[in-house]
Amino acid sequence: MRKKPGFEDLELPRYMSNGAAGMDLLAAVEEGISLQPGEIKFIPAGIYIALPPGYEAQLRPRSGLALKNGLSIVNSPGTVDSDYRGEIGVIMINLGKDPVLIHRGMRIAQMVIQEVVRGRWKEVGELDQTPRDSGGFGHTGQ
């Protein structure tokens, strides 16, 4: 991992408790960015990472920001592939009723590192049957 020049003062992503699954990402912005209701903006995190093959980083919303401000991530969870080397950033949306100011160093998202299992397809003439079969979209209950 390396920091974006000009943002060396920001902490590296870190777990905020012993039981936390995700590391908090910080907003790497020069000045505050206002996110209006319904508005979508890319918020840079000011870091570059190199994950080993077979791993991904998932970017997820922070529950406190979602509850208090209506902030979320448009493509949640966002995926950072192991071969990506660009700056990490978060595509945020304001689903709340009021503008939200994203300021330098604000905790904007969580990053969870996960192992990836790559599937391989095998084409068959027929699929096995299950009790659910082709039922979907509410088929198993509310």
Image (cartoon, rainbow, N blue to C red):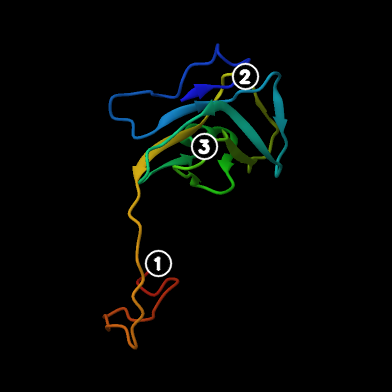
Report the residue marked by disc 2: 104
Q: CA distance from mark 1 to mark 2?
A: 42 Å
Q: Is residue 58 left or right of residue 126?
A: right
User: Which label was assigned to residue 142?
Assistant: 1
Task: Report the front residue among 79 and 100.
Answer: 79
The mark lying in front, picked from 2 and 3, is: 2
The answer to whether residue 123 is above or below residue 95 is below
What type is the residue that disc 1 sits on?
Gln
Residue 60: image location, x then y, percent:
47, 40
Residue at 61 percent of width and 41 percent of height? 91
Residue nearest the observer in this picture, 123 or 78: 123
Instruction: Name which residue type carries label 2.
Output: Arg
Proximity of marks 3 and 1: CB atoms separated by less than 8 Å: no
- Would you call the spot at circle 3 few (<14 residues within 10 Å), some (14-19), or many (20 or more)? few
User: Considering only order in the chain, which callout, 1 or 3, is on the residue closer to the N terminus?
Assistant: 3
Q: How many marks?
A: 3
Q: Secondary structure at mark 1?
A: loop
Disc number placed over residue 67 in the picture, else none: 3
N-term mark: 1 or 2: 2
Could you tell whether 4 is left or right of 77 in the image? right
Give the residue displayed 33% in from the left and 75% down from the top.
122
Q: Quadrant of residue 87?
A: top right
Q: Amino acid at mark 3?
A: Leu
Label 2: state its secondary structure.
Answer: loop
Judged from the image, the secondary structure of the residue bearing numbered disc 3 is helix
Q: Earlier in the sequence, mark 2 or mark 3?
A: 3
